[in-house]
Image (cartoon, coloured by chain):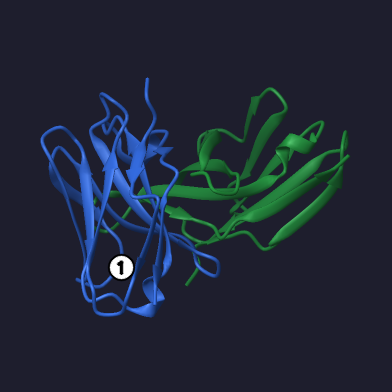
Chain colours: A green, B blue
Amino acid sequence: DQQVKQNSPSLSVQEGRISILNCDYTNSMFDYFLWYKKYPAEGPTFLISISSIKDKNEDGRFTVFLNKSAKHLSLHIVPSQPGDSAVYFCAASGFNAGNNRKLIWGLGTSLAVNP
Amino acid sequence: KAGVTQTPRYLIKTRGQQVTLSCSPISGHRSVSWYQQTPGQGLQFLFEYFSETQRNKGNFPGRFSGRQFSNSRSEMNVSTLELGDSALYLCASSLGASGHTETQYFGPGTRLLVL
């Protein structure tokens, strides 16, 4: 049962345009969400995060939007650059039944930004 | 500061063997998490160690084990290897104070191939 879903395995956009990566979650216990970027042969690197008390967080070209009622978040990259081509992982954090915080990852979306 | 290092980077084993992977976290980080990444399953959480104690555990069989040393370095061990254990094993470190709301810093991973 995939609690964090990234329904688009891949996305292709033109340089300069907006990239929108989507993520849906099923568990209401999640209260913190993160996006990571991964290049081939490297480990994921942290990109941006958002707490469930907010609906938007912005950092330069990257903005994450959270819609709690829809259990949906999205990452916007504006403008997209060829160097943004990577796999993007959405992750959700919350406490489990044992009162330990756990991090659940989506399967990733491969973004290709074409020059 | 040096990043997270993992050794070895590549490993080939045969079924039934056992393997030990090593992770050195960023200096000052006390939490180390291990993940398994496969193409179809994304990032699957194995376990997290904090101050030499296992703080969180994923849903992997007992063949997968780990430990953390007093200098925060961590090892994970997989016994009786199966073909399905072929994957990229990623280690991530964080300060450890607030679990998974913290930013995790990933190493480059160890790619394990089981023949």
User: Is A1 on the left or on the right of A89, as rendered?
Assistant: left
SS label for mark 1:
loop
User: Is A53 on the left or on the right of A114, as rendered?
Assistant: left
Per the image, the residue denoted by label 1 is B59
Image quarter (top left, top right, bottom left or bottom right) of the C terminus of chain A = top right
User: Is A103 on the left or on the right of A36, as rendered?
Assistant: left
Q: Which residue is located at x 76 percent, y 45 percent? A: A20
Residue B1 is situated, as x and y percent measured from the top left of the image, at 37, 20
Residue B115 is situated, as x and y percent measured from the top left of the image, at 39, 77
Residue B112 is situated, as x and y percent measured from the top left of the image, at 39, 63
B16 vs A111: above or below: below
Q: Amino acid at mark 1?
A: Asn
Classify 10 Å Cα crowding around label 1: few (below 14), some (14-19), many (20 and above). few
Q: Which residue is located at x 30 percent, y 68 percent? A: B59
Q: Nearer the viewer, residue A87 or B99?
A: A87
A86 vs B60: above or below: above
Q: Which residue is located at x 15 percent, y 32 percent? A: B71
The chain letter under disc 1 is B
Q: Which residue is located at x 22 percent, y 69 percent? A: B18
Q: Nearer the viewer, residue A67 or A73?
A: A73
